Amino acid sequence: MRAQTLHLAMASVSVSSRLNKAIHQHYMSLPQGDLCQVTYIWIDGSGEGLRNKTRTLDREPQGIEDIPEWNFDGSSTYQAEGSNSDMFLIPVAMFRDPFTLESNKLVLCEVLKYNRLPAESNLRSGCKKVMEEVKHYIPWFGMEQEYTLLGMDGRPYGWPQNGFPGPQGPYYCGVGADNAYGRDIMECHYKACLYSGVKICGTNAEVMPSQFEFQVGLCEGIEMGDHLWMARFLLHRVCEDFGVVATLDPKPMKGNWNGAGCHTNVSTKEMREEGGLQHIEQAIEKLSKRHSQHICVYDPHGGQDNIRRLTGLHETSSIHDFCFGVANRGASIRIPRQVAQEGKGYFEDRRPSANCDPYAVTGAIARTCLLGMEEEEEST
């Protein structure tokens, strides 16, 4: 019986995670002189997956302008035909590398096609244009990224092999081995983000066991998408070391279990000043008129992922209806109670799915609330 239990436990983590980490650490501690490893990171053609590869530079880059463009085989990332597969990597944001340390860097990149136009999955390009147009509003964003830990067997990490844990209730912000499944990963990810320079501002265990959340912000304009994508990369990379999988599926488990969202907090300079509540209400009114269009860009599949989550149950609104309220977590848009009392601050859009593209979400909100422009379903 013990042998069977051990086998099941080992099956829930990846093979590579069981390699000898002491040997790995020996090589990681070797000096590298003035040379610098730079890991290029980009979004693949799925619009959800992240890819990366590393090169050596002669010296530590002092800024993004010191990092050269690179290329990759787009036919292996769902982004190009094999007969014309070279894609360009354009560095846009640089962070410290918490895995290889020293002077090494992680670099988030935009992807351009052979003709130097943005790849279909490169929603950053359109978002940046919008953020440039609205920068005088000084838009601030914060995004709350929920995720679920899975074993290699596809079951939520720590869940019984042939059953389910107890019902939801004790897990949200819970403590204890019977309530928190995988806290080590949450804490290591937090530290990795802080070291790298990602603007992570908090974290907590979520309502469903094996589900967690981290918050990124405050970020201004395009910075929101850059920092959230890098935080996601760090999450997947930390989970790789532990041999488990982090999924951003909006509804990883059917039944009476909470889904996973990416609630988006929004404010402008006017909203943060005295009398800001009226500007918040004006923005919400604009959002109410564009509900269906926003639903189409709030997950990568035009609402087909979010429809499993936005049911009107489990702290969500219905995907078919728009509503807002003070301190109401069952609404499309929540006005925090403190904001209502002080008459200024921010609002929270609770509709984006966990696997949303933050460039699409923040771009759509900026267009609707600040520009009042019509956005197409497939763009920001």
Image (cartoon, rainbow, N blue to C red):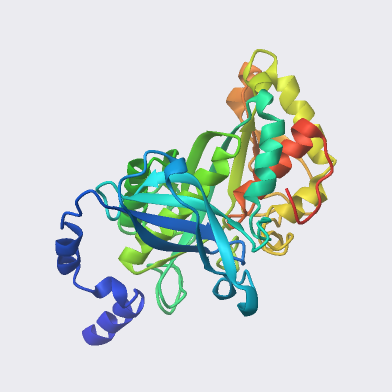
Residue 89 relative to residue 282: left or right: left
- Residue at point 63%, 79% (across, down): 83
Residue 278 relative to residue 187: left or right: right
Q: From where the camera sits, is residue 332 visible?
A: no
Residue 44 location in percent, x, y? 57, 64
> 236 above or below 373?
below
> 138 above or below 36?
above
Q: How many numbered markers are drawn?
A: 0
Q: From where the camera sits, is residue 224 visible?
A: yes
Quadrant housing residue 233: bottom left
- Residue at point 78%, 39% (across, down): 287
- Residue at point 33%, 49% (across, down): 187
> 27 above or below 323?
below
Residue 27 location in percent, x, y? 17, 63
Nearer to me, 69 or 296: 69
Residue 207 location in percent, x, y? 50, 53
Q: Seen from this angle, which residue lies furthest top? A: 274
Quadrant housing residue 249: bottom right
Nearer to me, 164 or 236: 236
- Residue at point 71%, 40% (across, down): 365
Quadrant (top left/top right/bottom left/bottom right) for the N terminus = bottom left
Nearer to me, 282 or 123: 123
Residue 253 location in percent, x, y? 56, 67
